[in-house]
Amino acid sequence: MRAVVTGGAGFLGSHLCDRLIAEGWDVLALDNQVTGVDSNVAHLLKHPKFRILRADVSNYIDVPGPVDYVLHFASPASPVDYLKMPIPTLKVGALGTHNALGLARAKNAKFFLASTSECYGDPEISPQHEEYWGHVNPIGPRGVYDEAKRYAEAMTMAYHRFHKMDTHIVRIFNTYGPRMRLNDGRALPNFVFQALSGMPLTVYGDGKQTRSFCYVADLIEGIYRLMMSDEHLPVNIGNPQEITIFEFAERIRKYFENAPPIIFKQLPQDDPKQRCPDISKAKRILKWEPKVGLEEGLKLTLSYFKDVFKKE
């Protein structure tokens, strides 16, 4: 079996490549390295079943030879990145998805879309289930990411219904683990970077907004099960254990001696007040639920971040 993974040098894409290789797949990763980095896949470069090509999937893509699965993971995913690159974010969600679907159709391959909990926007219900249509501001600064992913889902379902393609959609909730970029704008790497640098930990708003953090190994397990399933409608994959951002910052501080204090800044526009997945569908269909607790996952991730910080 041969898979093409767009965004294969990114945080999630590289972990997915690891899993596919471990399952015996041949993997071709495509990445323009706007946010992905070579170091994420350096350990795979000499593997006989792995190749990586520099490519922007927002442009036409062609892959020689047979392909069994196209997995579209290319996209800036942190607020810092997509606010800095709004148009490329929209393009990879629209044109990139179209090109990846076109490749899958040309190769008679299955297609997998990495979507996001951001499709729910600033939700009016919690936890969020897959039938909830969301509460998104399409013209706000975060709309470039939210609407790109919502459009990508609509296009994927159009290809499924019109072209009878075998497609799958995962809505990914907050995920953390090794290979995240330090200071990439998301809560965990931001807090760790600030603590390692001796800077105050920045909490936006009053810190009462909630998130739920899923360790990357759990997420990839859920994704692989969804890949192999017969489910075509979106499925939430995430950890339903909610924690406030302030509590999360306090949790991070406990891992550092003489930890810097917490400071508060204005909440960014349209920042979700709650983010928590209803994973009953994943439990029922995929027999999946997260296994790695926050304590264990944080130890593994902090160890990685400390090593990266020393090298930098």
Image (cartoon, rainbow, N blue to C red):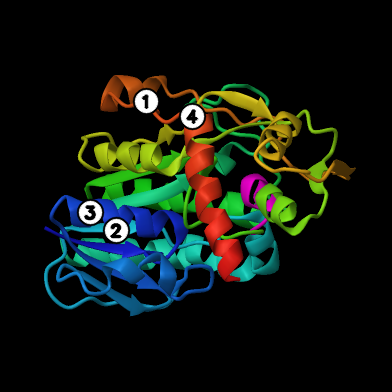
User: Number of labelled discs?
Assistant: 4
Residue density around tag 2, few if under 14, some if 14–19, many if 20 or more, within 10 Å: many
Of helix, strand and loop, which one carries label 2? helix
On the image, numbered disc 4 is attached to which residue?
239
Among numbered discs 4 and 2, the one appearing first in the sequence = 2
Residue 51 percent coordinates (x, y): 24, 73
Q: Which residue is mark 1?
A: 289
Query: Looking at numbered disc 1 in the image, what kind of residue is underneath it?
Result: Glu
Circle 4 crowding by C-alpha within 10 Å: few under 14, some 14–19, many from 20:
many
Q: Nearer the viewer, residue 108 or 126?
A: 126
Q: Residues within 10 Å of mark 3 (few under 14, many from 20)?
A: many
Which is more N-terminal, label 1 or label 2? Answer: 2
Gap between marks 1 and 4 measured at Cα: 8 Å
Q: From the image, tell me which residue sits under label 2.
A: 17
Distance, label 3 to label 1, CA atoms, is 20 Å
Q: Is residue 173 visible?
A: no
Asked if the magenta segment contains residue 185, the reply would be yes
Upstream in sequence: badge 1 or badge 4:
4
Q: Would you call the spot at circle 1 few (<14 residues within 10 Å), some (14-19), or many (20 or more)? A: some
Residue beneath disc 3 = 20
Q: Measuring 53% from the left and 60% from the top, which residue is drawn there?
A: 307
- Residue kind at label 4, given as amino acid type: Asn
21 to the left or right of 272: left
Q: Element at badge 1?
A: loop
Residue 170 x/y as whole percent: 39, 41
> Mark 3 near mark 2, Cβ–Cβ under 8 Å?
yes
Q: CA distance from mark 3 to mark 2?
A: 5 Å
Magenta highlight range? 184-190
Side of 306 relative to 272 (left or right) = left
| Residues marked 1 and 4 touching at CB (< 8 Å) | no
